[in-house]
Amino acid sequence: MFRTFNFFLREVWATFSRTPFLSFAFITQFSVSLIILGLFLISAAWLNSIFQEASTFYEIRAYLSPAVISEEQINSLEKEILKMPGVVSTEYFSSESALLFMKEQYHLDIQSIFGGNPLPSAFRIRIQPEADPAELAERMNSLNGIEETDYTRRKEFLLRLKWVVLGGQALALLVLLALALSTLFTVINTIRLSVYARRREIKVMEMVGASDWFIRWPFILEGLTGGLLSTFLSLAFVIVIFGIAWKFARLNLTFLPLPDLRTGFLLLGAVLSLFAIIVGVTGSYFAVNRFLGEVME
Amino acid sequence: MIFIEHAFLQYRNGTIGLADVSFSANKGDFMFIVGPTGCGKTSLFRLIYREVVPQRGKVYVLGKNVVNLPRWRVPYLRRNIGVVFQDFRLLPHRTAWENVAYALQVMGAPHAEIEEQVEEALSLVGLLDKREVYPELLSGGEMQRVSLARAIANRPPILLADEPTGNLDPDTSLEIIRLLERVNLRGTTVLVATHDKYIVDAMAKTVVRMENGRITGREERGTYSGNVQNL
């Protein structure tokens, strides 16, 4: 048993070293397919997490009356709001920071347009998804120092976003399925070409009395090794590309929620390995079967 | 050892390989199967090593009915039949030694046994000094001798040689046939399909003539076109 397995492993190594170009072509083709699949998978997962995060939280903006200027007043109002059931967090924006934001983000010099700063100070309040924003906004309106609240437009936007997210998910699933199928067919075709190139060898093996499984095993192990090597290469590529994208997003797109890359890559590695193993093994199995027992007339 | 009765074989493309063939060979026989191209010599061999199954008739090899043999048993039958082809069919990426050893590796033979039997087979065909040479660097005659060594490495009781001298010059051809005769002297049944009149006449062995998928004659110590007894 061990002797035979050892023989198969030596056969796999011999094939890779005897036909380096064919092996290189096979692994490159397999890797490129997996890279496309991997990039799409991780992009879809990232976008999904962004939409999920955006749609799970409702947000209320509470604008302060110009009379509220002291830090003590602001702190006391913040405490009142945080006490309300359903409120997750608050964030204070002074009128000056709002002005700066408009200038930096939209290049609008509000102060020179209006001859002063018309922007009010505000609290951005995150609430739990099950909380009723209308009721909470009303309660905040009743607080002394809150001039106005705003949530409705955001709620409508989030409702619309929900459909966008659902549509996006369905589309992503379809694209993923198409990509997976295209990878499957590309890889199976590559394996078939490599087996086709060795069909005479298979005939000779049959002739000297090799059993079907004795012929199949080296090919299956080749598919498995090729699949795992390709997974390793494609994963390394995807990690580098997404590492760069992640750094860019952290520095420049600070409003985006960033996922935990380590967990994402581990999961991607597991998914790609499983996919590559299944495709490599079944692809080789069926490709060899095509030539077993074939009669050359 | 080999017993075929009223075998009819038609390929999927419609070609009739064997119209109605009855044939038998005993242990230790040496026979030439002669006849024009397409007369059914190769089909007869394919029937024996069970690459094809006849639509009608009986085929018994080594006491087994190979017509009903399940596919998974076929490799075991083939390990008892050595086959030599006109185009040698060596594995190009293996040395002479590895090509011969492969026939024993498929049977799961222990390393020591493989070493011993490969050495014996290669020395019988006189190629022990070329054991590490790849087929592309061997001459036609040498390739055929490696192919013969592979066919006899596990000492099969039957050896089929399909046009073994088709690609060789007359001297090398005679050398190969002499080797087949030596294998035969060890008790192996040897069947040789050939067009080579010179060889058949020189050896004076049993000659079986085929035409249009039928056996038309058989002669002990016969010649290629000599006085063949009509069946």
Image (tube, coloured by chain):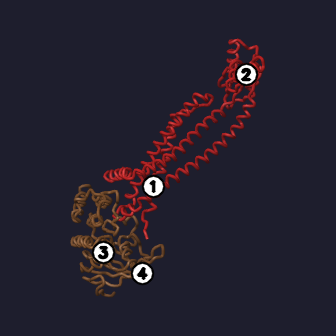
The secondary structure type at the circle numbered 4 is: strand
Q: CA distance from mark 1 to mark 4?
A: 39 Å
* Badges 3 and 1, same chain: no
Q: CA distance from mark 2 to mark 1?
A: 66 Å
Are dots 3 and 1 in contact, CB under 8 Å?
A: no
Residue at numbered disc 2: A109
Q: Nearer the viewer, residue A104 or B169?
A: B169
Upstream in sequence: badge 3 or badge 4 = 4
Are dots 2 and 1 in contact, CB under 8 Å?
A: no
Question: Which chain can be seen in red?
Answer: A
- Residue type, mark 1 in image: Ser
Residue at numbered disc 4: B19
* Badges 1 and 4, same chain: no
User: Is B68 placed left or right of A31 in the picture?
Assistant: left
Mark sitting on residue A284: 1
Residue at numbered disc 3: B192
Q: Quadrant of residue A217?
A: bottom left
- Residue type, mark 3 in image: Val
User: Is B226 placed left or right of A285 in the picture?
Assistant: left
Q: Residues within 10 Å of mark 2 (few under 14, many from 20)?
A: some
Query: Quarter of the image containing the C terminus of chain B?
Result: bottom left
Percent position (x, y) of residue A193? 46, 57
Select label 3 or label 2 by which is in front.
Answer: 2
Question: Which chain can be seen in brown?
Answer: B
Report in which chain the residue with disc 2 lies. A
Q: Residues within 10 Å of mark 4 (few under 14, many from 20)?
A: some
